[in-house]
Image: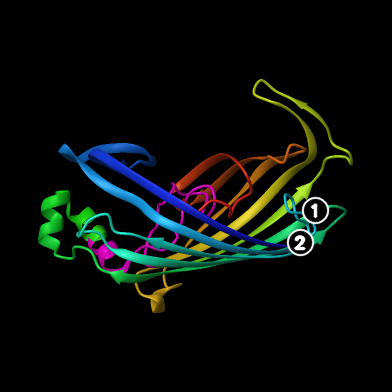
């Protein structure tokens, strides 16, 4: 199957304060680093997204064997002169290998690179005046100079870490996941407080992930982060998949409850 997509992604935000993580628990908020009055306006995303998906698997919703390759090309536009313009090229390769009666092992490899067309504001003193925080000013200087590739962290990549935890101009990510389908053939009715549906399959998943972010492509892999864990999935006849994952990493444990398999969203 060949699938072509075209979309528009626009996200803007206003920030009242910058809060550092709790040193004893990174999943909680700590002290306020700086407050903004008036609020700091920031363009999170203003891009055109183009994708091409080649799918040679046995099932679009819940594949057990085959290969899937997805190519993404994003055009990030500057909303003002101080912001950068850059393109992001991402390649996602997924390989499905059947095991046991109806289970599968999945391998996923993703590479993403930012290609800068116009740099944003790179003067550190001006950025420090705008953001009032040295770390945030340095981070924005790198974004304005090198752009930002697909991030790591969240429900899709490195699930032990918060959404967008690691960002940089270049990204390399690898994951493997064993999906054990343990439900009987034919499924059955699933009733809960939130929804009713017919269940095609129930799964227990075990996964391991490793990813690296760098400003220079030659530095990819020199510093990496890993994540591992387990999850439960309901594959429903309506076409939805309900996923609950618990993942651990060197910053603690993170819980994800989401509709869809990993490696699907790229916000």
Q: Is residue 29 left or right of residue 124?
A: right
Q: Is residue 67 left or right of residue 22?
A: right
Read off the magenta span.
141-169
Provide the secondary structure element on which disc 2 rests: strand
Residue 205 got which mark? none
What residue sits 27% from the left and 54% below the top? 79
The image shows residue 46 at horizontal and vertical percentages of: 36, 53
What residue sits 75% from the left and 55% below the top? 63
Residue 103 got which mark? 1
Q: Is residue 171 visible?
A: no
- Closer to the camera, 63 or 243? 63
> Could you tell me which quadrant the N terminus lies in?
bottom right
The image shows residue 199 at horizontal and vertical percentages of: 79, 35
Q: Is residue 227 visible?
A: yes
Report the predominant secondary structure element of the magenta stretch: loop
- Classed neighbour count for the residue bearing mark 1: other residues with Cα under 10 Å, few (<14), some (14–19), many (≥20): many
Q: On the image, numbered disc 2 is attached to which residue?
A: 57
Q: Is residue 181 left or right of residue 207?
A: right
Of the two numbered discs 1 and 2 on the same chain, state the one appearing first in sequence. Answer: 2
- Closer to the camera, 10 or 103? 10
Q: Is residue 154 magenta?
A: yes
What residue sits 57% from the left and 57% below the top? 5
Q: Nearer the viewer, mark 1 or mark 2?
A: 2
CA gap, disc 1 and disc 2: 14 Å
User: On the image, which quarter does residue 145 sit in?
Assistant: bottom left
User: On the image, which quarter does residue 12 sit in?
Assistant: top left
Q: Is residue 1 magenta?
A: no
Q: Is residue 232 left or right of residue 41?
A: right
């Amino acid at each position: 199957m060949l699938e072509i997509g075209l979309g528009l992604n626009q996200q803007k935000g206003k920030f009242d304060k910058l809060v550092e993580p709790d040193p004893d628990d990174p999943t909680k908020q700590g002290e306020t680093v700086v407050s903004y009055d008036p609020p700091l306006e920031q363009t999170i995303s203003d891009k055109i997204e183009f994708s091409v998906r080649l799918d040679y698997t046995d099932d679009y919703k819940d594949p057990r064997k085959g290969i899937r390759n997805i190519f993404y090309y994003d055009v990030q536009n500057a909303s003002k002169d101080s912001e950068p313009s850059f393109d992001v090229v991402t390649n996602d390769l997924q390989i499905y290998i059947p095991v046991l009666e109806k289970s599968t092992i999945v391998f996923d490899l993703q590479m993403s690179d930012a290609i800068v067309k116009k740099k944003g504001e790179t003067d550190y003193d001006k950025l420090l005046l705008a953001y009032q925080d040295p770390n945030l000013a340095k981070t924005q200087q790198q974004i304005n100079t090198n752009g930002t590739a697909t991030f790591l962290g969240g429900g899709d990549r490195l699930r032990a870490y918060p959404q967008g935890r690691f960002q940089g101009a270049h990204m390399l990510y690898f994951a493997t996941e064993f999906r054990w389908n343990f439900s009987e053939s034919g499924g059955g009715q699933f009733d809960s407080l939130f929804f009713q549906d017919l269940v095609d399959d129930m799964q227990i998943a075990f996964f391991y992930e490793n990813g690296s972010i760098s400003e220079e492509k030659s530095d990819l892999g020199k510093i990496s982060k890993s994540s591992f864990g387990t999850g439960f999935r309901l594959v429903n006849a309506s076409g939805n998949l309900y996923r609950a994952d618990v993942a651990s990493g060197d910053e603690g444990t993170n819980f994800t409850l989401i509709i869809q398999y990993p490696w699907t969203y790229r916000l």
